[in-house]
Image (cartoon, grey):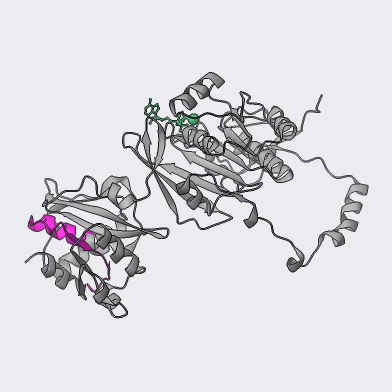
Amino acid sequence: MTPKLKTNYICQNCGYVSPRWTGKCPSCEQWNTLIETIVESKKTKSNRESSVKNVQARIQPLHHVIHTSDGNRTASGIAELDRVLGGGIVQGSVMLIGGDPGIGKSTLMLQIAGNLKNKKLLYVSGEESPSQIKMRADRLGLTLENFLVLPETSLDVVASAIESESPDFVVIDSIQTVYIPELESSPGTISQLRESTALLIKTAKSTNIPVFIVGHITKDGTIAGPKSIEHMVDVVLQFEGERTHFYRVLRGIKNRFGSTNEIGIFEMTEKGLKEVPNPSEVFLSQRNYGASGCVISSAIEGTRPILIEVQALVCTTSYGVPQRTAMGFDYKRLNILIAVIEKKLGIYLNKHDIFLNIAGGVKIDETAVDLAAAMSIYSSYRDIPVDSETVIMGEVGLAGEIRTISSIEKRINEAEKLGFKKIILPKNNIKNLNTKKYKIQIIGVERIKEAASAIIN
Ligand SMILES: Nc1ncnc2c1ncn2[C@@H]1O[C@H](COP(=O)(O)OP(=O)(O)OP(=O)(O)O)[C@@H](O)[C@H]1O
Ligand SMILES: [Mg+2]
């Protein structure tokens, strides 16, 4: 029998140590800050002496270290996932996939297994019975031959299963259901999450087996969200999207082996997640032709340009203070744009409610969409539609100037590919551009006023 580990409760605010849990920290008087933590047994004197002696052997010059990670990537066969991971799954890495309940995390894991048929996968399921998993696999049309299911929630059993089976991949579905029996806290609490993740990381690193950890994101505080373990794992991916919409976005939040500004786009179908290789077509699939306040713009997500529809609705306010709402767009930037529009276009919006939305549920934090947002507000205010064959892009400065944006050629190519006829962009961007090679009409603008008169006469 394994000896019971000693645990104590440490206040996350002031560091006070208590042998038992209390709701309020006796030292700093904060509520709910005491977290159960395993006490590492103190090293004996001889132990300490030997580590001090060994330290010389452990120090090494960095150029002697052989790095192996790049050659050890395994492509998952799902191109959208591989791109977000930075080229595939790295041996011994621990990846956290977070997302709202029902978004499709388990489906994604099964599909990875379906693609890597010749690899052995150990699927630790704390939520679903093996028959439920089989049902899902059948619905997705997957034949999983090397797929081992372990319906278990106790992590020491899981760790020993990983060591004895030595699979090629491990999936823990989900981290909120597994627990370390030595801890008194119930599964899903912060202390269990942390200690469980630490154990999984240790197992992954010592066996060099990649581990996917599925984590639910919860809005209320009762079950700890996977946020508290983000700093420990190698990769954090977030699965986003509205459950009522079909599109799902896989976003890299943290990646120790690649860039984090890549996104993967999927469509949820009855047969599982389908990759969407051309996202612009998706976001523009339900576009409005000839409606005022709707403008097409271009955003760079990772390395790919995506065309999106920016929608604004400007209407007379019924209350004293006008409403300003931004969906998928930065609220502060919206307020700046409104101020610039008022000053430079000479219209007054203090008696108008303004709603700005990026269609399709995407979030844009790029300033290149500024001009399109400003023009959509202007178009809605004047109630005159913007030509639906025109793409507008550019950053708007406080003086009403249109500032240069990055990756201009990529954006123009994407607009041309999707059959747009005209593109309005910052004049400074044209300087180093060979405009003759494009069929699309390119109009450079220097000031917001010029842009306004170019789209609405
Ligand atoms: N028969 C079906 N046809 C189409 N889509 C389905 C079908 N059954 C389930 N789905 C989709 O799959 C989603 C559930 O997928 P999955 O179980 O992988 O999500 P999850 O994120 O693992 O959820 P949980 O939080 O319960 O673990 C549903 O929300 C639904 O969109
Ligand atoms: Mg699930």
Give the residue furthest to the right. 46
Q: Residue at x 11, y 53 (%)?
A: 292
**Residue 398 is one of the magenta-drawn residues:** yes
Q: Is residue 35 visible?
A: no
Residue 234 position within the rendered picture, expressed as x and y whole percent measured from the top left: 60, 49
User: Which corner quadrant of the image does residue 364 belong to?
Assistant: bottom left
Taking 83 as reference, is 170 above or below it? Answer: above
Instruction: Determine whether, in the image, residue 63 is placed left or right of residue 411.
Output: right
Q: Residue 173's spot in the image, x, y percent?
A: 56, 32
Q: Which residues are magenta?
A: 373-401
Left or right: 393 in relation to 43: left
Q: Quadrant of residue 191?
A: top right
Identify the image quadrant of residue 76.
Answer: top right
Is residue 452 in view?
Answer: yes
Q: Left or right of 397: which side holds 22? A: right
Q: Which residue is at a point 8% across and 55% down the rendered structure image?
A: 383
Horizontally, is 367 left or right of 65 in the view? left
Q: Residue furthest bottom?
A: 431
